[in-house]
Image (cartoon, rainbow, N blue to C red):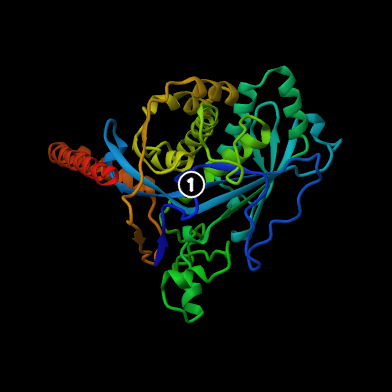
Amino acid sequence: MSKFVYQHKDCESDCYRAHSCYRPPPPPPSSLALGPANPPHLPTRVASAPGKVLMTGGYLILERPNAGIVLSTNARFYVIVKPLYEETKPESWAWAWTDVKLTSPQMARESMYKLSLKHLLLECVSSSDSRNPFVEYALQYAIAAAHARFDKTKKEELQKLLLLGLDITILGCNEFYSYRNQIEARGLPLTPESLASLPPFTSITFNAEESSGTKNKPEVAKTGLGSSAAMTTAVVAALLHYLGVVNLPSEVNGHLQGNKVSEELDVVHIIAQTAHCIAQGKVGSGFDVSSGVYGSQRYVRFSPEVLSSAQDSVQGISIEEAIGDVLKANWDHERTKFSLPPMMTLLLGEPGTGGSSTPSMVGAVKKWQKSDPQNSLETWKKLSEALLQLNLNANKIINA
């Protein structure tokens, strides 16, 4: 039902990497309004990151040195970060805490937090049902990265900026979610054109609760394009740029090239990868975050040991110290730029029941490997050989 073209007709593939801009892209008249700009002396930052499709290497990519080919989509998550207040509130809990507001207009949700400026801990002061661990870890780790990289003067400036509070708004393109019910309610056919006719950032319908009467947390029907990774990457990129940790060029003002930009993207990647892995339970290879930062690629995962400090922070050591160690760790993932052969377009279908749970599916595969080690090893070997051959043939076509 949903069609995604992996290279924009007017741009190079760089436009699908994580990037930041000083204003959101101009939406059509029917789209969700993003609100007026802040006064000139107060910064507003917008960043976006694309979704993903793993073309080859499913499950195989979980283990080094197996590779997978992942494509970034033109469906993106957008994150807007600005001060919550125009001036510092004198009652900011004796300068020890600041306010954070997280808004998801598509889900009609707003969450309020208190952030400890000393320990970087978050305390949710609104409904616990609206909490999002991916955003919470992204927020904590981005601020911890600023503390880890700044000198004394910059830390004082950071403190002043944070005391203005943080106002974070998250928007995802319609392609990340299932709008089958809305399309059918309008009497439209289930086609890409019908999906495109919906207003950008359309409100999301939640899955119904169990008929048994058991009160379960309502879930969003997703299409499996890596919404949590794209959202986490966009949140991290927007926050790091807002706080002055990185300086990402806008898509409008220039392509993401050069060693300096590559170093900035590396910081975004490390923090986003760490936040996403910890929030998800460190299950997964990280290919979705990597493609959200760098674009389509052939990817080999990092060694899980690089996250040991972040895992320790959950158990007691300071977040600032843990993230400082993570930034210095040897990130040994491998990525090689990849693009589809000329004139090739992928068409994806959405089954209507939403995406699956990545941790549970990965867990099922791991269980199978343990229960049948010999057959699973032989299967892995055959898949790895087939993937290598596919990579060689694809490169021949692209370079022909």
Which quarter of the rendered picture does the N terminus lie within? bottom left
Q: How many marks?
A: 1
What is the quadrant of residue 247 in the picture? top right
Give the residue displayed 35% in from the left and 42% down from the top.
338
| In front of the other: 186 or 365 | 186
| In front of the other: 283 or 389 | 389
User: How far from the left and from the top, in percent, is residue 352?
Assistant: 39, 67
What is the quadrant of residue 98 in the picture? top right
Give the residue displayed 53% in from the left and 26% down from the top.
313
Q: Is residue 352 visible?
A: yes
Identify the residue under disc 1: 16
The local secondary structure at tag 1 comes to helix
User: What amino acid type should be assigned to the residue bearing mark 1?
Assistant: Tyr
Which quarter of the rendered picture does the C terminus lie within? top left
Residue extending farthest to the right is 90
Give the residue displayed 57% in from the left and 63% down from the top.
200
Give the residue displayed 46% in from the left and 77% down from the top.
184
